[in-house]
Amino acid sequence: MSTQPLAPWLQRQLQAVLAQRGHAVLLAGPSGLGQYDLALAVARAWLCEQPTGQGACGECASCHAIDVRTHADLCTLMPETLCVTLGWPIDESDQREIDEKKRKPSRFIRVESARQAVAFTQTTSARGGQKVVMVYPADRLNVEAANTLLKTLEEPSPSVRFVLATEAAHQLLPTIRSRCQTLQLAWPDAEEGMAWLQAQGGMNLSAALAWWHASGGRPDMALALSRSGLSPEQWVKLPQALARGDWSALSEQPPATQLDVLQKLCHDLMARAAGAPSRFFPQDQLPPPPPWRVLALWSRELALAARSVEHPYQAGLLQEAWAARAREALGAARR
């Protein structure tokens, strides 16, 4: 499994983390800035056999073991849904339950997984060096799981280090935050971000600029949008199309992408209704904003839908319901 070089703004922040001596670091910032990539780079550097001030060497046996997801001294504490997406193994007994359809993969970090991580910290290193626990996204720790980690996080073995990453630091228990050195991720500027987008996505400057604005200046999100199958022209026309009830541009997208588009549109309409500039769509392409009470209700409904979007009840029916609700909300401006 090949590892892409870190984006330049993440590389700078990696060097800042590696200059610290604490046993636990919390990487915090809004979504789309690369928390997972940075957390993994920190873990790789801490475990590397020949690390430098720039990070892991990328050539040693330890780096290779992380690349193929088999490093015995790295414990990845993630929701099972993300383990599947990112290629990390799930505990054998948990995988059996999922395979036998006794339950679905969890979208939260379960207390059983936290207990396994604590047990991991109490054993001897397989390679005779450090052990690392990587927690992502840390805000998916439920209360029981977070409390299970607390004592170990506060007083770990001298050979154990923690790297936590989150896109919602405010949702973490204060006791978790207080036990970590926090690094607030810096936003890249537009010029650097778009140059990276062009290199990663093989796109021209015009397309990079379009996706940069569509993501609100969040590079990981911009890259994901560029690979979604939508064109910049389709993106610009989405607000008016959804107001007409035309869902065709989104019909082949996964539920998470559909919901993300609706939340961005709702955000921009609320901004416009409040007299602020839009963030994700060109302002002249937005339909007239509905009354504030309609937007507030729609926003709450979308936030509620986000809790189960990774396990949609029935994708086709869900899509129809979202399309109808979007048309109803946007049509309120004309009534």
Image: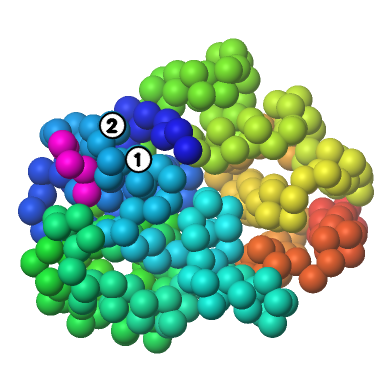
Residue 81 placement (x, y as % from top left): 58, 63
Residue type of the residue flagged with mark 2: Glu
Residue 185 visible here: no
Residue 260 placement (x, y as % from top left): 66, 51
In whole angstroms, how far apart are the C-alphas of marks 2 and 1? 7 Å
The reply, left or right, for residue 175 in relation to residue 199 is: left
The reply, left or right, for residue 333 in relation to residue 33 is: right
**Based on the displayed image, in which of its 4 quarters is residue 18 positioned?**
top left
Span highlighted in magenta in the image: 47-51
The reply, left or right, for residue 60 in relation to residue 181 is: right
* As drawn, 271 above or below 3: below
**Based on the displayed image, in which of its 4 quarters is residue 331 positioned?**
bottom right
Mark 2 lies on a secondary structure that is loop
At 72% across and 77% down in the image, what residue appears? 101
Q: Are the two marked residues, 2 and 1, in contact with CB atoms closer than 8 angstroms?
A: yes
Residue type of the residue flagged with mark 1: His
Q: Residues within 10 Å of mark 1 (few under 14, many from 20)?
A: some
Return the residue nearer the eye: 109 or 301. 109
- Quarter of the image with the C terminus is bottom right
Secondary structure mostly seen in the magenta stretch: loop
Mark carried by residue 238: none
Q: Residues within 10 Å of mark 2 (few under 14, many from 20)?
A: few
Q: Which residue is mark 2?
A: 59
Q: Which residue is mark 1?
A: 64
* As drawn, 131 above or below 57: below
* As drawn, 86 above or below 176: above
